[in-house]
Image (cartoon, rainbow, N blue to C red):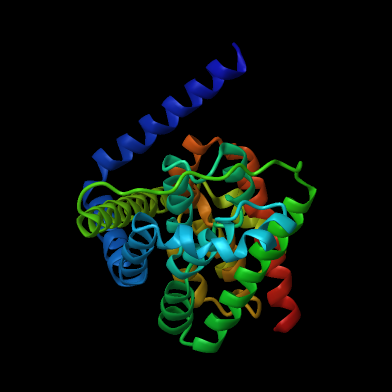
Amino acid sequence: MTIKRLKYVILCLCITLFGAALIIYPERYAAACLEGFVLWAECVLPSLFPFVVLSLVFIKTGIADRASLPLKRAMNALNLPKNAAVCFLLSVCSGYPAGSRMVAEFYENGALTKEDCKKIAPLCSTSGPLFIIGSVGYKMFGDKLLGVKIFAAHVLAVLIFSLIYCRFCKKTQHVPPKRIKSAGNILYDSFYGAIVSVAVAGGFIAFFYVVAKFLQDFYILLPLEKFFGLFMEESAAKACCLGLAEVTTGCRYLAASPSPVKGALAGFMITFGGISILAQQLAYLIKTGVKPIKFIAFKFIQAALCFALLLAVQ
């Protein structure tokens, strides 16, 4: 049996088992799906939607393209396309997966090449301040200052790694990008695009919330929990395992843990993103030529750096 065929068999088996669990225990997993949507509505929707609308308006009106012109020389010095700074700022303000959506939007409009997208994809992969400071820090952990620390370490880790990575990338000749032109009703297009993006994010969160429950119910994550338990509190280990599937769920469980390093662990989970956020980002980035395995490896390095920064200031 070839490796490709083996992967296909394993995937089919996993889907079958998951589908069977949904049929046998509909009351549990239907309730879990609803909990996932409630979590999205309370913690993600308010922090994501307004900024996605603004970001799309900036891009479709050409404001973002013009705003990047003064930074062209600085971006060239860093071996980055001129739109990199604008994409990064939009990503920091909006949060996952808006940064990846912006990169794809620039690419589809001819303002970024595939090589440009590969360089800036890790740079434009950040969570937003409303989610980290408001939802995680204030609502979940009851500590706004901790949220500020996590956000600062998160952005700094992404920025440090991405700039170092770009310095070692092959120098490319940045051709003058096409001027972004928007046809039709800009405001309608921006709201429609934002609604679709935020709704898709909600679907991912609800689905992987159910997946996390399934993995927990059938003790699939138990070996990983035991491994993590060698280095941290049992409750923190469980939260981290859930966070690998859906980071909002993981952070909520982590907030209830007595672990002294739960803030640093939350920073790691948020920066890495978990399967749910990684899948959301890659849904936009794959069309730009970004390689999934490489992107996930980069996110892990960024997460480890964020964890180290938070431990240093704890």
Q: Relative to the observer, which residue lies in front, 10 or 247?
A: 247
Q: Quadrant of residue 95?
A: bottom left
Q: In the displayed structure, would residue 243 be above or below residue 104?
A: below
Q: Is residue 212 left or right of residue 30?
A: right
Q: Position of residue 154 (x, y in %)?
A: 61, 69
**Number of numbered discs visible in the structure rendering:** 0
The structure residue drawn at horizontal position 43% and vertical position 72%, both measured from the top left corner, is 131
Q: Relative to the observer, which residue lies in front, 278 or 139?
A: 278
Q: Is residue 89 left or right of residue 120?
A: left
- Whether residue 178 is visible to the viewer of this picture, yes or no, is yes
Look at the image and tell me in which quarter the C terminus lies: bottom right
Q: Position of residue 203 (x, y in %)?
A: 30, 51
Q: Position of residue 121 (x, y in %)?
A: 57, 50
Q: Position of residue 313 (x, y in %)?
A: 72, 83
- Whether residue 229 is visible to the viewer of this picture, yes or no, is no
Q: Is residue 15 left or right of residue 145?
A: left
The structure residue drawn at horizontal position 21% and vertical position 52%, both measured from the top left corner, is 27
